[in-house]
Amino acid sequence: MSRLCVIAGDAHPALGRRVAELAGAELVPAAIAAFADGETRVRIEGEVRGSDLYVVQPTSAPVNDRLMSLALIADAARAAGASRLTAVIPYFGYARQDARKQPGEARSAQLAARVLECAGFERLVALELHSAALDSAFRIPLTHVEADDAALPLILEWHLPGLTVVSPDAGGLKRAQRYASALHAPLAVVAKTRSGPDAAVALAVLGEVRGRNCLIIDDMASTGGTIAGAAESLRAAGAAAVHAFFVHAVMAPGAVERMKAAGVRLMAATDSIAPAARAAGPLKIVETAPLLARTLTGLAER
């Protein structure tokens, strides 16, 4: 068996170190810096020759820099003789751009996937991609990790009586359905329309929410507008209280405040994006390293 190694990228080094610890893998140091003009420079400072190497790097803000760092690490690792190379991407930037919604638009998700493939990655592990259709964007094997096992213990700790699980749009129904089934709760959905890349307008609530604790489940919160709009619709439909769990805390400035103003009481997300990249706010954070480490060790045995 090849030596199991992990490189913690510059986007979330604490998560990479924790994954290596839980997986019992050797943590290989890498120096990532930039020239004065912004060019990224990468140098692997440990031995990776013959190793089964995993690079942990969310492509969170600044997305282009993180994606380029990840690609350069792959190129450096290939040159240094790594025998197998896997990208572990807790948050995959560009995932929302998986289809051409208007003429002239780029399919950025597919292009980002090809960049990683061309850089030398043979496999990819991703946590909660925005759309199941993204599977087809990757020509290399993809392992899609769901955040349920990290989120459900916290949700159970909230002790929410009369719980209804809510998808804030039709696209998230399968994800919300998983949580509803695990929590033995009914399911509701908020129908919405989208007027722009970061703007959504809630239309109607489908399902029984009156007098109930409603838990919105979503893959990410960026501006907080989707969750805020859903919360306002749920309250207008008679919900007793509204809470939210979203996997990726992208969190543009003002996102937490927008959701709180819409009546969202309890909020939680995973640590797929480093705290420095999130707006400060009353978010409960759940750890993803155990999920990722378990996935990593499973792949290493194949």
Image (cartoon, rainbow, N blue to C red):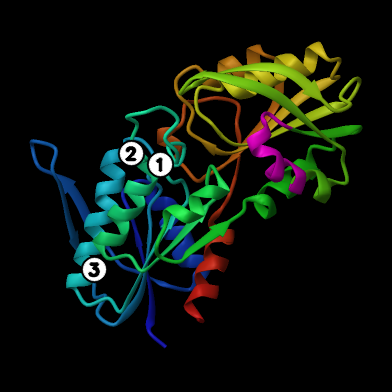
Q: Name the residue nearer the viewer: 300 or 117.
A: 117
* Helix, strand or loop at mark 3: helix
Answer whether residue 101 is magenta in the image: no
Which amino acid is tagged 1? Gly
| Of the pair 115 and 288, the residue shown nearer to us | 115
Residue extent of the magenta highlight: 167-178
Query: Residue 14 or 291: which is nearer the viewer?
Result: 291
Q: Which residue lies under the disc numbered 2?
A: 63
Q: Residue at x 53, y 57 (%)?
A: 289
Amino acid type indicated by mark 2: Val
Q: Quadrant of residue 31?
A: bottom left
State the residue position of label 1: 93
Query: Which residue is found at the position 58% from the left and 15% from the top?
Result: 258
Residue 300, above or below 10 = below
Mark 2, other Cα within 10 Å: few <14 / some 14–19 / many ≥20 = some
On screen, residue 84 above or below 9: below
